[in-house]
Image (tube, rainbow, N blue to C red):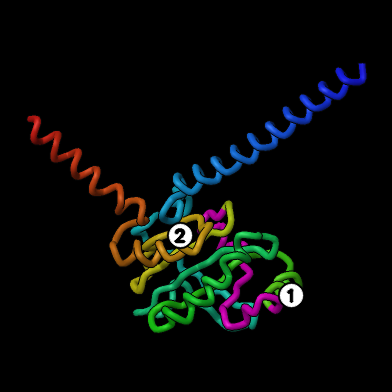
């Protein structure tokens, strides 16, 4: 009887270990699949001003009580980065934002945007060393661009036109906004899809 019990317990442990191994393997496969299907550029949404349209004209004040006009001065592009103190992905991207601000200072002004409790944002700004950024708390600004999820970024070109926008989940997606403006497309995804579309049109014309 005891022998049978030991054998059954042993079999149960073997089954349990096999299940653990399978779960770990499945988790790794999910991670690999996510990396393969992750978008190369910012995820563009259809809400708010469309790419190619003039950015809404707004007179705002920063947390330092300085005036801020959007779009910015002629000849300067503006990157609006919508974030929240409670957004983990936003915090992960802060080093990339600081790096971009230094690298692109000659032609790009960066504005951090949010709304909510001033004291919470002051503490957040101080903790993460964001005093070098123009930081705006404005619910109307978020409504103007129909921001529903964070982090979200909008790039306004030097002529005051929305040149790229989208949800941002990585440094690569953030940098893709600048690349999209250089390429003259709404997103890097659009640029990558264009050759395939042109090839399809060429094949269709060849068939006729």
Residue 158 badge? none
Q: Position of residue 18 (x, y in %)?
A: 68, 32
Report the residue marked by disc 2.
173
Quarter occupied by the C terminus: top left
Choose top left, top right, bottom left or bottom right for residue 191.
bottom left
Q: Earlier in the sequence, mark 1 or mark 2?
A: 1
Q: How dense is the environment of label 2, judged by Cα within 10 Å: few (below 14), some, or many (20 and up)?
A: many
Tell me what residue is drawn at x 56 percent, y 81 percent. 67
Residue extent of the magenta highlight: 126-147
Tell me what residue is drawn at x 47 percent, y 54 percent. 48
Q: Position of residue 38 (x, y in %)?
A: 47, 48
Q: Position of residue 56 (x, y in %)?
A: 45, 64
Seen in the image, is 79 located left or right of residue 140? Answer: left
Tell me what residue is drawn at x 52 percent, y 71 percent. 96
Seen in the image, is 139 located left or right of residue 123? Answer: left
Tag in front: 1 or 2: 2
Seen in the image, is 100 located left or right of residue 136? Answer: left
Q: CA distance from mark 1 to mark 2?
A: 27 Å
Number of numbered discs: 2
Question: Could you tell me which secondary element the residue under label 2 belongs to?
Answer: helix
Residue 123 badge? 1
Q: Position of residue 200 (x, y in %)?
A: 20, 38
Q: Kindly give the residue lying farthest to the front in the view shown.
A: 3
Question: Could you tell me which secondary element the residue under label 1 belongs to?
Answer: helix
Residue 116 shown in magenta: no
Q: Work out whether residue 198 can be spotted.
A: yes
Q: Work out whether residue 144 can be spotted.
A: no
Quarter occupied by the N terminus: top right
């Amino acid at each position: 009887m005891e022998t049978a019990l030991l054998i059954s317990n042993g079999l149960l442990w073997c089954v349990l270990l096999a299940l653990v191994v399978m779960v770990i393997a499945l988790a790794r496969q999910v991670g690999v699949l996510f990396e393969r299907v992750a978008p190369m550029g910012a995820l563009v949404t259809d809400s708010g001003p469309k790419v190619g349209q003039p950015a809404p004209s707004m007179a705002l004040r920063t947390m330092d009580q300085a005036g801020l006009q959007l779009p910015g001065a002629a000849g300067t592009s503006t990157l609006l980065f919508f974030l929240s103190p409670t957004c983990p992905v936003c915090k992960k991207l802060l080093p990339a934002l600081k790096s971009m601000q230094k690298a692109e200072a000659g032609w790009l002004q960066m504005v951090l945007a949010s709304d909510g409790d001033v004291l919470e944002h002051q503490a957040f700004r101080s903790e993460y060393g964001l005093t070098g950024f123009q930081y705006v708390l404005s619910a109307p600004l978020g409504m103007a661009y129909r921001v529903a999820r964070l982090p979200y970024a909008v790039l306004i070109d030097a002529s005051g036109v929305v040149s790229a926008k989208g949800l941002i989940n990585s440094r690569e997606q953030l940098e893709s906004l600048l690349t999209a403006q250089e390429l003259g497309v709404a997103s890097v995804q659009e640029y990558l899809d264009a050759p395939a579309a042109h090839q399809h049109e060429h094949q269709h014309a060849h068939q006729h």
